[in-house]
Image (cartoon, rainbow, N blue to C red):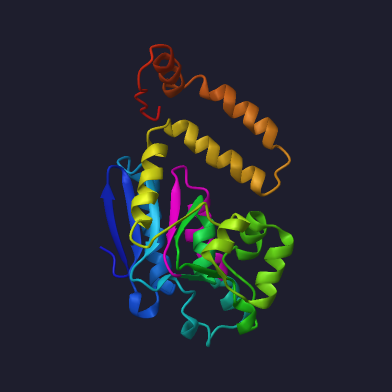
Amino acid sequence: MYTTLLTTTDNGIFTITINRPDKLNALNKTVIDELSAAIYEVYTNPSIKSAIITGSGAKAFVAGADISGFVSLDGRGGQALAQTGQDLVFSKIENSPKPIIAAVNGFALGGGCELAMACHFRLCSENAKFGQPEVNLGLVPGYGGTQRLTQLIGKGKAMELMMTGNMIDANEAKQLGLVNYITTAETLLDKTKELLQVINSKAPVAIKNVIALTNIAAYGGSNGLQKEIQAFGELFDTKDAKEGAAAFLEKRKANFTGE
């Protein structure tokens, strides 16, 4: 089905692997289009409860965009490139009602760092490297990097990384809050799946609202508290909330259906 992606589903976890190891999994139009289709699967396939985005090979998650495609672009083309990527992939990942987690092995640079940051949170291997080196090309991040990096690590450090183009390693990424966990390369996917299995056992309607409400907070939405009150109340009318309360009182494991 895909030419640049490998996909598998296991126990409700959909793993999307960007499969261009000879190009360090660099993003081009085909990858963006196919990622868009894969994210659509996450949204629409009821058997998928959550997803992982990762890269193939030992060297890179995604080492950036395919720069060869930049040479012929003018201002209008560059804006269209950024708009299309954000609309089709990055915003769709960030706003997915189902958790999408990045498993970063090796380089996550430029568009690769932005792809990881669009995910709901990130795990990385010990050899991971993160950076936004667009200034080296006379550019700025175009897939949400200026916004999400600032949200995740704060204004000062985000400014430094984007103005110098310097990379940070896994340990600094964790210290800054860019990643949640560091693992070995061999255990990265297992640890990511372990976390998602825990999340998948919770009420899907609650998880969906956690994502939406946290995104409001991340972007400084002024109505976040009111939206939380509204969601809290609405969830009492769901089957999942009734099941959760009943299971707690009956001292048994809840059987959530997403209703």
Q: Position of residue 51 (x, y in %)?
A: 38, 50
Q: 92 and 118: which one is in front?
A: 118
Quarter occupied by residue 114:
bottom right
Residue shown at 38% from the left, 57% from the top: 188
User: In which quadrant is the C terminus drawn?
Assistant: top left
Q: How many numbered marks, from 0 up?
A: 0
Return the x and y of residue 4 as percentages of the image width and height. Answer: 32, 70
Q: As rendered, which of 53 and 222 lies closer to the eye? A: 53
Residue at image coords 34%, 62%:
17
Q: Position of residue 247 (x, y in %)?
A: 39, 17
Quarter of the N terminus within the rendering:
bottom left
Over which residues does the magenta segment extend? Answer: 82-106
Q: Is residue 98 magenta?
A: yes
- Position of residue 48 relative to residue 251, above or below, is below
Can see residue 84? Answer: no
Q: Is residue 17 left or right of residue 170?
A: left
Whether residue 247 appears in magenta in the rendering, the answer is no
In the image, residue 254 above or below residue 56? above
Outermost residue to the top: 250
Residue at 53% x, 87% y is: 71
Horizontal relation, residue 35 to residue 222: left or right: left
Viewer can see residue 242: yes
Closer to the camera, 5 or 108? 108
Question: Percent position (x, y) of residue 199?
Answer: 42, 38
Vertical order, 166 against 236 (above or below) = below
